[in-house]
Image: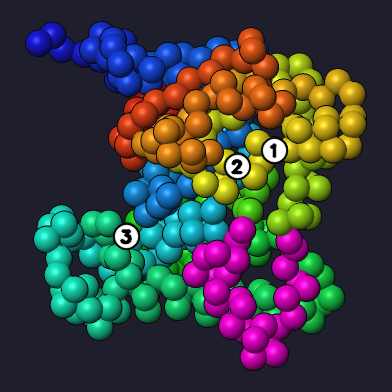
Amino acid sequence: MKSYTSLSSFLEDNFRHFNAASLVDAAKGYKAHLNKDGKMMITLAGAMSTAELGISLAEMIRQDKVHIISCTGANLEEDIMNLVAHNSYKRVPHYRDLSPQDEMALLEEGFNRVTDTCIPEEEAFRKLQRHLIEHWKDVQNKGERLFPHEFMYRMLKSGELETHYETDAKNSWMLAAAEKNIPIIVPGWEDSTTGNIFASYCYSGELSPSIMKSGVEYMVWLAQWYKENANGGGIGFFQIGGGIAGDFPICVVPMLSQDLNEKDIPCWSYFCQISDSTTSYGSYSGAVPNEKITWGKLLESTPKYIVESDASIVAPLIFGYILGI
């Protein structure tokens, strides 16, 4: 086998068919979109932060290859949890062999399992909780309201977590995003551990739910951002996994053009999805890109790609290709 001086040349040489070829095509399409002065949204579902996607995504953000992110509340928090509790995480490579008793033992040790990776309850969740409650109370006392990601940005930018960092800060996509101040959309944020923690304070009467801006407000904000940025090269949509992280923001186009009847709203100008969902099950996450044409999200001419594979493998390779590694 010949030697290679770059990841890009290796992929172009060896990834020639099937999902491998789709991966390279999608990466080339992403680069072509950016070269036309296009902007790109990346959406994060699943447990991409726990999979440490930040190792490659953070550099994408720093090099202006990403302009806006939509993610689940879990991905928002878990990148920071890894940053401050990395040394206490536990990997269980034999997770397929665990019995219910083994799972109970992990719980009793204070671990919450995500496939082969266990997140430490005290070092991760509770450490963030102790910092976030102070920001939530401060905003409430001042009569302010913020989006979920804005609380995280305040916490990161304050520097208060720096003494807790247990892994290289350059591998945190949330820290990179905060430093660039790129917008983040977090639909369904309350379906996350920090969302549950926040709800517990609201239940006890310590906090008011009103200090946290809602998903509807995220859509209103996104609609204005989209209108201000969709001209020129347009806005691309790079979807990692399925679910609400992708389903929610892609609908901003038909909301503007169909529900508001606004004229000349451009569709998304690039689309790629990395998914292992099965189309025949009727899931939106598994729908092929052409289905989105019928909903007014994509055009017939929009470059469309789907890579049916494991996002934890595919996304870093595509990012590496785009970064010219």
Which corner quadrant holds the N terminus? top left
Q: Are marks 1 and 2 in contact (CB under 8 Å)?
A: yes
On residue 114, the disc is 3
Between discs 3 and 2, the one toward the N terminus: 3
Mark 1, residue position: 251
Between discs 1 and 3, the one toward the N terminus: 3
Identify the residue at horizontal 23%, vertical 57% (top origin).
116
Name the front one of labels 1 and 3.
Answer: 1
Query: For this view, does 260 lie left or right of residue 160?
Result: right
Q: Is residue 139 above or below residue 312?
A: below
Neighbourhood count class around disc 3 (C-alpha, 10 Å): few under 14, some 14–19, many 20 upward: some
Mark 2, residue position: 247
Name the foreground residue: 53 vs 248: 248
**Stretch in magenta:** 188-214
- Element type at marker 1? loop
Identify the residue at horizontal 74%, vertical 51% (top origin).
218
Rendering coords of residue 209 (x, y %): 73, 76
Mark 1–mark 2 distance (CA, rounded to whole Å): 7 Å
Neighbourhood count class around disc 1 (C-alpha, 10 Å): few under 14, some 14–19, many 20 upward: some
Identify the residue at horizontal 36%, vertical 29% (top origin).
308
Name the foreground residue: 185 vs 250: 250
